[in-house]
């Protein structure tokens, strides 16, 4: 410093170096220090270090003290613990001696809050007062005591651990970080367990909280399924083996906290509830020891409620008891051999149970099918197959019940037959169309043959056919098939246009277009219509079978007729054919009868008994354009003449009708105006009448309303007064009743207080009596007597010891007859008598 005089304030200090001795000393204020020439101020002035009650400071290279005073060496230097540190707490302000250093700033002491612990690690070995090592370097521990934490130089704070609050239905999953003993139980590193107690939990130094485990609520209808990950003893004291599964139900606990060795398989295992009309079959049932019986079945009938244990499952879920009516049967099959009543069933046996009854199938029985009686009307049937013989029969027209060895048989039909049956197309001009309707193949195939048709059915097993004439119902036996007809259709005719099952017998018409050429090469197109029918004896089977001998009878007949017509037209010129086309065509089709020489009326095909009874020419169209133009011109001219004539006629009629209508319209106008004037007059009259009625009604209503208002007002005042009087009466009665109840309550209260005082006095007197009795009993009568005699006897002995003949005790307030007393004292009374008097008087 530049000056040699240093003024130190209170709580200031400096370091002064004596250059001659090379010694540094500390000078603390308040003082005025004069520096000498051989001295140097090496540090300061600085403030003394002051540590509050809630703070501490860490000093490096602390000074060695003895009796709280620093120790100096022979040279005057403060002796230090070099390389060491020291923590100083609240004390008087102090300076730093040469070599000492303050590490950091003065630090506030840490407070350990509630439910908190400080994690401490030893940085060096810690010794106790006996120089024994109590903590080794690197060892860690917790300080849990609530209050101020005073650090030590041998330890360091490495963290804080807060307590975890364990609520109801919660547990902490804890893991051991290293081997240690907890409450007499060995814990190994990596081991996990649960802490279940409610409240705040502060883990130990060797413990780690993995997480919070919440309890799973268990109800009467819901259980918890668990699996053991290793062999252990669970919370309920049951030994569980690794991989074992079990249920926690409401009977065991209403909530469960999964242990560390428990794995949740299903958190929602629902109860299986059966009513008295239900049953179920449990697969792999569990025995009393909890072991599943694999491959077995167990029948459970209601009313019952239970949980499926691990490994168990329901077969076909919950089922209702089978109720059979009078028209029902049950087809059963034995899974294994067993005895049912008096019947011995072998594995694979099939039998029927007929209703009415309730049936609960045992576990040895498999229910194949529940059957009902098949009601069949006339014309209805089903195909039934005998499973033992393989034969198929048709049951028609009566209700039937299948036997145990019988089953319904499905009859397959070709696709085209299925379509025809579904669409029921029977006309020869209609084509079959696909449909989505499905046929019950077990039902007997039926087909309604329309009137005037025939259907052929072929039995391919017996190789015979039969023909059914409509109207009739065709029923197919199991081995029969329909004969499908493919006929020509359209105009002109095309093959396979119509597919049908029924052959129309006629009479009917069929149309066709035929192109012909005359002898003078005029080409024409003819539209022809043929009348036809089948003519045969229905009682003659050979005649009947001929009608199906030709499949496409329409196409063959039309082609035959067309060839005959072409031949007949080819031999005639156009002019002749134009004049007599019908006769030429009939002659070509039917020919000439050799006996009469006249044109025949029909032609008969013997191969299939088809009769063509007539032919009609519906149209003749020339194919050549010139012929068409000529015919068109002549036709147009004739049409124009006819059209003009008809136009003039209709124009005249229209003018006539117009005049008549005009006259009627004028007349109607006049009539309507007259009627309108009459209605207008009537309207004015009605308006006047309505206005009068309206005015009278208004006045009447107003008067009546005033009357009713006054009446209601008066009635209301009367009722109001009545209600006010009643209210006043009720109010007064309530006040009286309230006062009465209040007085009654006061009286009851005083009575109870008096009773309590009496009872208290009685109890106190009883207590005093009992106390006195117990004291007397404890002391004894002899003792009391001795106590009573002890006082007088002592006084007598005292008087005898003093040599007194008598004594008198008075308080000076009461007068005493001294004469009598003196006489008594000096009288001729013996000593013993005086003693007796004294005793009695004293007592």
Image: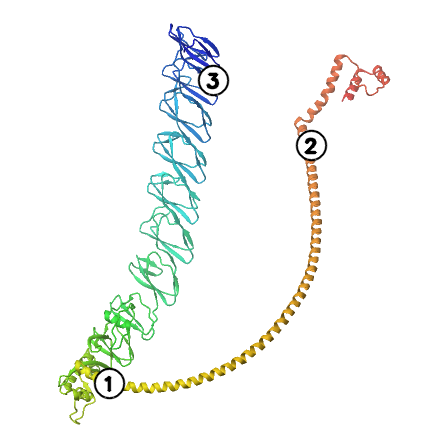
Helix, strand or loop for disc 1: helix
Whole-percent x, y for residue 644 in the image: 29, 85
Work out how far the residue at label 2 is from the one at label 1, CA to CA, in angstroms.
161 Å
Residue 91 is tagged as 3
Work out how far the residue at label 3 is from the one at label 2, CA to CA, in angstroms.
69 Å
Residue labelled with disc 2: 769
The residue closer to the viewer here, 346 or 283, is: 283
Residue labelled with disc 1: 637
- The answer to whether 583 is drawn above or below residue 326 in the figure is below
Quarter of the picture containing the N terminus is top left
The residue closer to the viewer here, 809 or 90, is: 90
Are the residues tagged 3 and 2 within 8 Å (C-beta)? no
Between discs 2 and 1, the one toward the N terminus:
1
Quarter of the picture containing the C terminus is top right
When asked about the image quadrant of residue 625, the answer is: bottom left
Residue at the bottom extreme of this rendering: 596
- The answer to whether 299 is drawn above or below residue 809 in the figure is below
Q: Is 809 on the left or on the right of 73, as rendered?
A: right
Are the residues tagged 1 and 3 within 8 Å (C-beta)? no
Q: Is residue 494 visible?
A: yes
When asked about the image quadrant of residue 593, the answer is: bottom left
């Amino acid at each position: 410093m530049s000056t040699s005089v240093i003024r130190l304030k209170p709580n200031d200090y400096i370091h002064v170096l004596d250059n001659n001795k090379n010694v540094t000393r500390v000078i603390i204020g308040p003082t005025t220090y004069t520096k000498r020439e051989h001295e140097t101020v090496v540090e300061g002035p600085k403030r003394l270090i002051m540590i509050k009650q809630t703070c501490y400071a860490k000093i490096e290279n602390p000074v060695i003290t003895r009796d709280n005073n620093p120790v100096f060496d022979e040279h005057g230097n403060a002796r230090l613990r070099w390389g060491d540190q020291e923590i100083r707490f609240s004390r008087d302000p102090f300076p730093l001696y040469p070599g000492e250093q303050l590490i950091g700033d003065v630090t506030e002491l840490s407070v350990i809050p509630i439910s908190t612990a400080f994690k401490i690690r030893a940085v060096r070995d810690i010794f106790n007062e006996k120089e024994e090592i109590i903590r080794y370097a690197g060892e860690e521990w917790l300080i849990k005591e609530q209050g101020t934490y005073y650090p030590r130089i041998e330890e360091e704070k490495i963290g804080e651990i807060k307590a975890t609050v364990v609520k109801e239905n919660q547990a902490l999953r804890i893991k051991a970080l290293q081997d240690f003993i907890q409450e007499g139980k060995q814990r190994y590193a990596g081991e996990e367990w649960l802490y279940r107690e409610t409240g705040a939990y502060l883990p130990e130094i060797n413990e780690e909280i993995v997480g919070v485990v919440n309890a799973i609520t268990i109800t009467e209808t819901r259980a918890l399924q668990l699996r053991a990950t290793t062999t252990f003893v669970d919370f309920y004291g049951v030994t569980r083996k690794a991989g074992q599964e079990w249920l926690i139900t409401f009977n065991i606990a209403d909530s469960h906290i999964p242990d560390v060795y428990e794995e949740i398989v299903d958190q929602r295992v629902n109860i299986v509830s059966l009513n008295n009309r239900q049953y179920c079959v449990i697969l792999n049932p569990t025995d009393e020891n909890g072991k599943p019986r694999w491959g077995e079945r167990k029948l459970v009938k209601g009313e019952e409620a239970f949980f499926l244990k691990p490994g168990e499952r329901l077969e076909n879920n919950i089922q209702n008891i089978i109720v059979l009516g009078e028209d029902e049967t049950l087809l059963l099959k034995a899974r294994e051999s067993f005895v049912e009543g008096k019947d011995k069933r072998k594995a694979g046996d099939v039998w029927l149970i007929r209703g009415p009854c309730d049936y609960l199938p045992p576990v040895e029985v498999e229910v194949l099918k529940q059957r009902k009686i098949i009601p069949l009307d006339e014309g209805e049937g089903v195909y039934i197959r005998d499973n033992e013989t393989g034969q198929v029969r048709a049951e028609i027209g009566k209700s039937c019940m299948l036997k145990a060895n019988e089953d319904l048989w499905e009859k397959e039909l070709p696709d085209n037959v299925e379509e025809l049956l579904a669409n029921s197309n029977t006309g020869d001009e209609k084509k079959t169309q696909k449909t989505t309707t499905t046929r019950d193949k077990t039902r007997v195939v039926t087909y309604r043959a329309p009137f005037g048709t025939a259907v052929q059915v072929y039995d391919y097993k017996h190789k015979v056919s039969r023909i059914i004439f409509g109207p009739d119902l065709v029923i197919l036996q199991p081995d029969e098939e329909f004969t499908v007809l493919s006929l020509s259709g359209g105009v002109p005719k095309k093959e396979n246009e119509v597919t049908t099952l029924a052959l129309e017998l006629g009479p009917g018409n069929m149309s066709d277009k035929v192109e012909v050429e005359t002898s003078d090469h005029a080409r024409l197109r003819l539209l022809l219509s043929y009348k036809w029918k089948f003519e045969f004896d229905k009682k003659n089977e050979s005649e009947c079978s001929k009608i199906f001998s030709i499949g496409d009878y329409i196409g063959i007949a039309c082609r035959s007729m067309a060839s005959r017509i072409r031949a007949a037209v080819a031999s005639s010129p156009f002019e002749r054919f134009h004049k007599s086309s019908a006769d030429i065509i009939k002659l070509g089709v039917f020919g000439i009868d050799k006996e009469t020489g006249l044109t025949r009326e029909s032609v008969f095909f013997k191969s299939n008994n088809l009769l063509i009874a007539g032919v009609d020419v519906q149209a003749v169209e020339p194919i050549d354009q010139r012929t068409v133009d000529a015919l068109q011109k002549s036709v147009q001219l004739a049409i124009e003449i006819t059209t003009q004539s008809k136009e003039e006629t209709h124009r005249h009629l229209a003018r006539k009708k117009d005049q008549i209508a005009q006259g009627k319209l004028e007349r109607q106008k006049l009539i309507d105006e007259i009627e309108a004037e009459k209605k207008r007059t009537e309207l004015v009259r009605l308006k006047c009448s309505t206005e009068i009625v309206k005015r009278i009604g208004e006045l009447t209503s107003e008067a009546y309303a005033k009357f009713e208002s006054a009446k209601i007002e008066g009635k209301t005042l009367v009722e109001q007064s009545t209600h006010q009087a009643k209210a006043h009466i009720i109010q007064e009665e309530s006040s009286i009743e309230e006062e009465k109840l209040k007085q009654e309550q006061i009286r009851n209260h005083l009575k109870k207080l008096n009773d309590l005082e009496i009872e208290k006095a009685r109890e106190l007197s009883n207590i005093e009596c009992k106390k006195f009795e117990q004291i007397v009993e404890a002391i004894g009568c002899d003792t009391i007597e001795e106590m009573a005699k002890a006082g007088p006897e002592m006084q007598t002995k005292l008087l005898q010891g003093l040599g007194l003949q008598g004594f008198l005790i008075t308080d000076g307030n009461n007068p005493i007859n001294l004469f009598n007393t003196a006489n008594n004292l000096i009288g001729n009374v013996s000593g013993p008598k005086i003693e007796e008097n004294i005793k009695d008087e004293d007592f």
